Amino acid sequence: MAEGSIKAPAADSRRRSSADKTRIREILGSFGSPIAVLVLWEIGARTGVLDARILPPPTVVAVTIWDMIQHDQLLENTGITTLRFLVGMIVGTIPGTLLGLTMGLFRGVRVTLKPLVAIFYPIPRIALFPLVLILVGLNETSNIIMIAIGPFFTMLITAMAAVINVEPIFLDVAKNFGVKPRQLYFTVTLPAVLPSLMAGGLVSLGLALLGTVAVEFLVSTEGLGYVIWNSWQVLSLSRSMAGLVVAAILGAACYLLMDWLERWITPWQSPAAKR
Amino acid sequence: MGRAAREENALDGRDREPAHAQLQPVAGITIQGMTKSFDVRPQPVRALDRVDLFVADGEFLCIVGPSGCGKTTLLRILAGLESPSEGTVDFAINHTNRPLQSMVFQEQGVFPWLTALDNAAFGLTARGVAKSERVERARAMLAKLGLSGFENTYPRQLSGGMRQRVNLARAFANDPAILLMDEPLGALDEQTKMLVQDDLLKLWEETRKTVIFITHSLDEAVVLGDRVAVMSHRPGRIKALYPVTLARPRNALELRNNPEFIEVRSRIWEALREEVLWSREE
């Protein structure tokens, strides 16, 4: 066959170009699917298949967004939500990760703290809100705590499990080649758990965003959650929808950022490195 | 050559090692009365039972035995990853300016987060060898194993055979006096295995390090080793030792049709078969 006679370098470049094609196809696909949904939505709303009063078409939503940016401080509200989300994410993930790693590394700490995790983790987090409000007060701190709880537990459990599940062979290799016990954490344990931490980060992201919007629904007078809820209560559905779309864009942006961060921090896990 | 003389000695002492090898002024590894028990429930498991073994400096010793016979445990003790319950190991091998031993682990022991080059240089990095020197040594070792151009590739992008060569490069670049190999080629397919065996033979024939090589493949043991030790079923003991006098340099592929190879192999198989059957009945 013709393929059999191709020499190695040619085959190599051929493979690369087909990898490029796959990549392009993936990018087109990842942009294509949301665009397809928008187009169908637009057509549906215009033709009356969807009730335009409940689901105003994307073009109308876009105009509403523009209008709200100019007259109703939509950007400011988006900024407030983003800030809350980021602070909550940091306050949750960093201590959660550190505590999880510590619990994974030291059996004593793990045995002592695990019962507390087992008690607090399964409580529906939003049910804790009244308690937090009473303890901390009706202020931004309690909002941040509510947002941070989800990422905190997610990272704690992910990090702990990741450390416990580090392949023993990696530790053996390091020991055999003379890595000192204290260096072991940085040369083996940390890189070995990074992929799990990145996955936990992605889950935390969704939880933090959920927490942010939930808190804004309930107590806040600013932020995207407030915009969505308030607009709905006055039955201004296109404004509510506009807030929802902006929140979705914010979420997607964070997701993409995280994806990029993952490629950068764990390059050996990138799709090109997977067989 | 001293090597030929030693092989003859090995022939004379067929099946039986001098029990007090440490009395002789010969350089090598002396294992005496080594016993290892693991404290597991419901009752402790005895993995090794009074193992006596002498491995001469510069010798390539292969150990075969039924699965679960404790051969890996023996190697892990030599590698400093376990300590024996009883008995002693004496490393009378000169290793100035180099580490005493490095282990070649099974394929999954290659670090996925390091490039081929960083993996190969791992031991040198851990020992604090200067960057320029360790890069040079790791690069040279990868080149010897046919991995030039893959220095910056992550293990996941490599085939199983290439990954295993990275694993070999890591141990050889570290340049220890003794190499301990734990079924390093066990996960490879037959063809790739033969190719990597050839690489390994070439490297070893250049360096003549002391090697203890554990394998479940009798073919592999005979292709590679100066001597083959057969271990008994659990608790593991050295049941018999067989010299392999096939001429070097050896070629993994051609050797398999060599009458002498076939003869030695069938002789060892008789000893091994009993043990394999035994452990199967358990």
Image (cartoon, coloured by chain):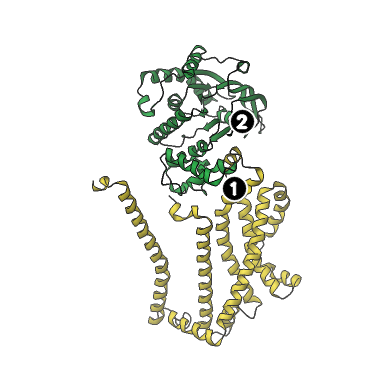
Chain colours: A yellow, B green
Residue type at numbered disc 2: Ile
Residue type at numbered disc 1: Thr
Q: Residue at x 56, y 20 (%)?
A: B238
Q: As drawn, is B43 to the left or to the right of B58?
A: right
State the CA–CA distance, disc 1 to disc 2: 23 Å
In terms of depth relative to the viewer, which is nearer, A223 or B167? B167
Relative to A163, is B277 above or below?
above
Relative to B241, is B189 above or below?
below
Q: As drawn, is B140 to the left or to the right of A195?
A: left
Q: Residue at x 55, y 88 (%)?
A: A71
Q: Residue at x 67, y 62 (%)?
A: A123
x, y percent for residue A220? 65, 78
Q: Residue furthest top?
A: B12
Q: Residue furthest bottom?
A: A71
| Residue at which label 1 appears | A187
In terms of depth relative to the viewer, which is nearer, A97 or A234? A97
Relative to A70, is B239 above or below?
above
| Residue at which label 2 appears | B77
Q: Residue furthest left?
A: A1
